[in-house]
Amino acid sequence: NPAQKKKAKTLTPYERFFEEFEAAQAACDAVGQILVRGVSAEEEEEDYSEDEQDEEVQKLNAGLTDADIAKMRLIVITPKREEALDRMGRMILGDDFDEDFLMQNTSFSLEVLGAYDGFADMYKRLKEWDVKFDHLFAFTYGLWNDDVWMHDHEMGWGEIGGAKMCKGLARLWKAILKKSDAELGITEKYTRPGVIALCEKFKEAVEDIEDEGITFKFA
Protein backbone atom coordinates (compact mmCIF):
# COMPACT_ATOMS: atom_id res chain seq x y z
CA ASN A 1 0.00 0.00 0.00
CA PRO A 2 1.71 3.26 -1.14
CA ALA A 3 -0.07 5.30 1.53
CA GLN A 4 1.24 3.02 4.28
CA LYS A 5 4.77 3.16 2.88
CA LYS A 6 4.59 6.93 2.77
CA LYS A 7 3.37 7.05 6.38
CA ALA A 8 6.18 4.75 7.54
CA LYS A 9 8.75 7.01 5.92
CA THR A 10 7.44 10.05 7.77
CA LEU A 11 7.69 8.50 11.24
CA THR A 12 10.43 9.88 13.47
CA PRO A 13 12.78 7.34 15.11
CA TYR A 14 10.90 7.95 18.38
CA GLU A 15 7.51 7.29 16.79
CA ARG A 16 8.78 4.24 14.94
CA PHE A 17 10.27 2.78 18.14
CA PHE A 18 7.06 3.13 20.11
CA GLU A 19 4.92 1.84 17.26
CA GLU A 20 7.01 -1.36 17.30
CA PHE A 21 7.13 -1.43 21.11
CA GLU A 22 3.35 -1.11 21.48
CA ALA A 23 2.85 -3.91 18.94
CA ALA A 24 5.17 -6.13 20.98
CA GLN A 25 3.25 -5.26 24.15
CA ALA A 26 -0.06 -6.12 22.50
CA ALA A 27 1.32 -9.48 21.35
CA CYS A 28 2.02 -10.55 24.95
CA ASP A 29 -1.03 -8.85 26.53
CA ALA A 30 1.24 -6.48 28.45
CA VAL A 31 -0.31 -4.19 31.04
CA GLY A 32 2.47 -1.58 31.01
CA GLN A 33 6.18 -0.96 30.97
CA ILE A 34 8.98 0.34 33.17
CA LEU A 35 11.47 2.80 31.73
CA VAL A 36 14.91 1.94 33.11
CA ARG A 37 16.94 4.27 30.93
CA GLY A 38 15.63 7.16 28.85
CA VAL A 39 17.22 9.31 26.20
CA SER A 40 15.93 12.87 26.63
CA ALA A 41 18.61 15.34 27.58
CA GLU A 42 18.11 17.14 30.88
CA GLU A 43 16.68 20.60 30.40
CA GLU A 44 17.39 23.70 32.38
CA GLU A 45 14.53 24.44 34.75
CA GLU A 46 12.20 27.02 33.30
CA ASP A 47 8.77 28.26 34.28
CA TYR A 48 6.73 26.35 31.70
CA SER A 49 2.99 25.86 31.78
CA GLU A 50 1.79 22.25 31.49
CA ASP A 51 0.96 22.72 27.80
CA GLU A 52 4.36 24.30 27.15
CA GLN A 53 6.08 21.40 28.92
CA ASP A 54 4.21 18.92 26.72
CA GLU A 55 5.23 20.90 23.65
CA GLU A 56 8.89 20.95 24.73
CA VAL A 57 8.87 17.18 25.35
CA GLN A 58 7.33 16.61 21.91
CA LYS A 59 10.04 18.75 20.31
CA LEU A 60 12.77 16.83 22.15
CA ASN A 61 11.30 13.47 21.16
CA ALA A 62 10.91 14.54 17.52
CA GLY A 63 14.58 15.45 17.42
CA LEU A 64 15.84 12.09 18.73
CA THR A 65 17.98 10.07 16.35
CA ASP A 66 18.18 6.30 15.91
CA ALA A 67 21.39 6.39 17.96
CA ASP A 68 19.53 8.17 20.78
CA ILE A 69 16.68 5.66 20.69
CA ALA A 70 19.15 2.76 20.82
CA LYS A 71 20.13 3.89 24.33
CA MET A 72 16.58 3.48 25.65
CA ARG A 73 15.85 0.51 27.91
CA LEU A 74 12.35 -0.64 28.81
CA ILE A 75 10.95 -3.66 30.61
CA VAL A 76 7.64 -5.03 29.41
CA ILE A 77 5.20 -5.67 32.26
CA THR A 78 3.03 -8.71 31.64
CA PRO A 79 0.11 -9.57 33.95
CA LYS A 80 2.30 -12.13 35.78
CA ARG A 81 5.14 -9.62 36.13
CA GLU A 82 2.68 -7.09 37.54
CA GLU A 83 1.57 -9.65 40.14
CA ALA A 84 5.21 -10.28 41.04
CA LEU A 85 5.85 -6.53 41.41
CA ASP A 86 2.91 -6.30 43.80
CA ARG A 87 3.99 -9.35 45.81
CA MET A 88 7.65 -8.28 46.08
CA GLY A 89 6.70 -4.67 46.81
CA ARG A 90 4.65 -5.85 49.77
CA MET A 91 7.50 -8.09 50.90
CA ILE A 92 9.90 -5.12 50.94
CA LEU A 93 7.61 -2.37 52.22
CA GLY A 94 5.11 -4.30 54.31
CA ASP A 95 2.10 -2.22 55.35
CA ASP A 96 3.67 0.87 53.74
CA PHE A 97 3.19 -0.60 50.26
CA ASP A 98 -0.25 1.00 49.89
CA GLU A 99 0.84 4.38 51.26
CA ASP A 100 1.29 7.37 48.94
CA PHE A 101 4.01 8.90 51.10
CA LEU A 102 6.67 6.81 52.82
CA MET A 103 8.34 7.90 56.05
CA GLN A 104 11.41 5.65 56.05
CA ASN A 105 14.43 5.92 58.30
CA THR A 106 17.58 4.01 59.21
CA SER A 107 15.60 1.01 60.45
CA PHE A 108 14.37 0.39 56.88
CA SER A 109 17.85 -0.90 56.04
CA LEU A 110 17.27 -3.74 58.51
CA GLU A 111 13.78 -4.38 57.16
CA VAL A 112 15.34 -4.78 53.71
CA LEU A 113 17.62 -7.52 55.04
CA GLY A 114 14.62 -9.30 56.53
CA ALA A 115 12.78 -8.99 53.22
CA TYR A 116 15.77 -10.50 51.40
CA ASP A 117 15.79 -13.51 53.73
CA GLY A 118 12.11 -14.04 52.97
CA PHE A 119 12.70 -13.61 49.25
CA ALA A 120 15.64 -16.03 49.17
CA ASP A 121 13.58 -18.68 50.97
CA MET A 122 10.65 -18.19 48.57
CA TYR A 123 12.88 -18.15 45.47
CA LYS A 124 14.30 -21.60 46.30
CA ARG A 125 10.79 -23.04 46.23
CA LEU A 126 9.90 -21.63 42.80
CA LYS A 127 10.16 -24.27 40.07
CA GLU A 128 9.61 -22.58 36.70
CA TRP A 129 12.32 -20.30 35.33
CA ASP A 130 9.83 -17.72 34.05
CA VAL A 131 8.31 -17.38 37.54
CA LYS A 132 11.79 -17.11 39.07
CA PHE A 133 12.68 -14.40 36.54
CA ASP A 134 9.57 -12.32 37.22
CA HIS A 135 10.12 -12.44 40.99
CA LEU A 136 13.86 -11.76 40.84
CA PHE A 137 13.21 -8.78 38.59
CA ALA A 138 10.40 -7.54 40.85
CA PHE A 139 12.43 -7.84 44.04
CA THR A 140 15.50 -6.15 42.54
CA TYR A 141 13.35 -3.37 41.07
CA GLY A 142 11.64 -2.85 44.42
CA LEU A 143 14.99 -2.44 46.18
CA TRP A 144 16.25 -0.07 43.48
CA ASN A 145 13.06 1.98 43.39
CA ASP A 146 12.73 2.38 47.19
CA ASP A 147 16.40 3.12 47.78
CA VAL A 148 16.39 4.95 51.13
CA TRP A 149 18.30 1.98 52.58
CA MET A 150 21.23 2.74 50.26
CA HIS A 151 21.68 6.22 51.71
CA ASP A 152 20.50 5.78 55.31
CA HIS A 153 21.56 2.52 56.94
CA GLU A 154 22.91 1.15 60.17
CA MET A 155 26.67 1.39 60.79
CA GLY A 156 28.26 -1.85 59.65
CA TRP A 157 25.19 -2.71 57.56
CA GLY A 158 27.32 -4.52 55.02
CA GLU A 159 28.77 -6.84 57.64
CA ILE A 160 25.43 -7.72 59.20
CA GLY A 161 23.86 -8.82 55.93
CA GLY A 162 24.03 -6.07 53.29
CA ALA A 163 27.06 -7.49 51.47
CA LYS A 164 25.57 -10.99 51.64
CA MET A 165 22.27 -9.76 50.17
CA CYS A 166 23.86 -7.99 47.21
CA LYS A 167 26.23 -10.88 46.54
CA GLY A 168 23.32 -13.33 46.70
CA LEU A 169 21.15 -11.32 44.30
CA ALA A 170 24.07 -10.98 41.87
CA ARG A 171 24.59 -14.75 41.94
CA LEU A 172 20.90 -15.34 41.13
CA TRP A 173 21.05 -12.87 38.24
CA LYS A 174 24.22 -14.43 36.86
CA ALA A 175 22.52 -17.83 36.77
CA ILE A 176 19.19 -16.70 35.38
CA LEU A 177 20.63 -14.55 32.58
CA LYS A 178 22.22 -17.71 31.15
CA LYS A 179 18.73 -19.05 30.42
CA SER A 180 17.06 -18.49 27.06
CA ASP A 181 14.29 -15.95 26.49
CA ALA A 182 11.87 -18.84 25.96
CA GLU A 183 12.76 -20.34 29.36
CA LEU A 184 12.31 -16.95 31.03
CA GLY A 185 8.96 -16.22 29.40
CA ILE A 186 10.36 -13.28 27.41
CA THR A 187 8.58 -13.01 24.06
CA GLU A 188 9.96 -9.67 22.84
CA LYS A 189 13.33 -7.97 22.32
CA TYR A 190 13.04 -5.28 25.02
CA THR A 191 12.91 -6.97 28.43
CA ARG A 192 16.30 -8.73 28.48
CA PRO A 193 18.28 -5.52 27.68
CA GLY A 194 15.97 -3.74 30.13
CA VAL A 195 16.75 -6.01 33.09
CA ILE A 196 20.46 -5.94 32.26
CA ALA A 197 20.29 -2.14 32.40
CA LEU A 198 18.44 -2.41 35.73
CA CYS A 199 21.21 -4.65 37.09
CA GLU A 200 23.85 -2.19 35.86
CA LYS A 201 22.09 0.67 37.66
CA PHE A 202 21.64 -1.44 40.80
CA LYS A 203 25.33 -2.41 40.71
CA GLU A 204 26.41 1.22 40.36
CA ALA A 205 24.17 2.28 43.24
CA VAL A 206 25.09 -0.42 45.76
CA GLU A 207 28.81 -0.39 45.00
CA ASP A 208 28.73 3.36 45.63
CA ILE A 209 27.67 2.76 49.25
CA GLU A 210 30.69 3.84 51.29
CA ASP A 211 32.62 1.64 53.71
CA GLU A 212 30.31 -1.38 53.51
CA GLY A 213 32.25 -3.68 51.14
CA ILE A 214 29.35 -4.12 48.74
CA THR A 215 29.83 -5.86 45.38
CA PHE A 216 27.25 -6.87 42.78
CA LYS A 217 28.93 -9.10 40.19
CA PHE A 218 25.90 -10.13 38.16
CA ALA A 219 27.74 -10.72 34.86
Image (tube, helix red, strand yellow):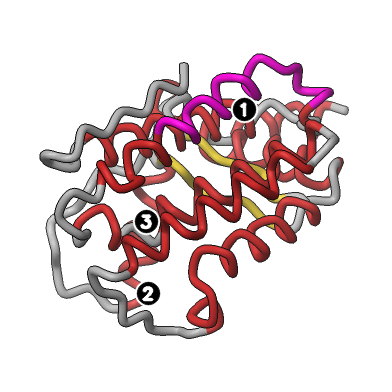
- Front residue of 5/66: it is 66
Residue at the spot x=33%, y=57% of the render? 147
Residue at the spot x=42%, y=45% of the render? 61
Residue 212, percent across and down?
A: 18, 40
Q: CA distance from mark 3 to mark 2?
A: 10 Å
Q: Which stretch did the figure color magenta?
A: 167-183
Residue at the spot x=26%, y=53% of the render? 150
Q: Is residue 63 visible?
A: no
**Left or right of 77 on screen, residue 182:** right
Q: Which mark is residue 192?
A: 1
Q: Amino acid at mark 3?
A: Val
Our reading of the magenta stretch's main secondary structure is helix
Asked if 103 appears above or below 137 in the picture, the reply is below
Q: CA distance from mark 1 to mark 3?
A: 27 Å
Residue at the spot x=35%, y=77% of the render? 50
Q: Label 2: which residue?
A: 51
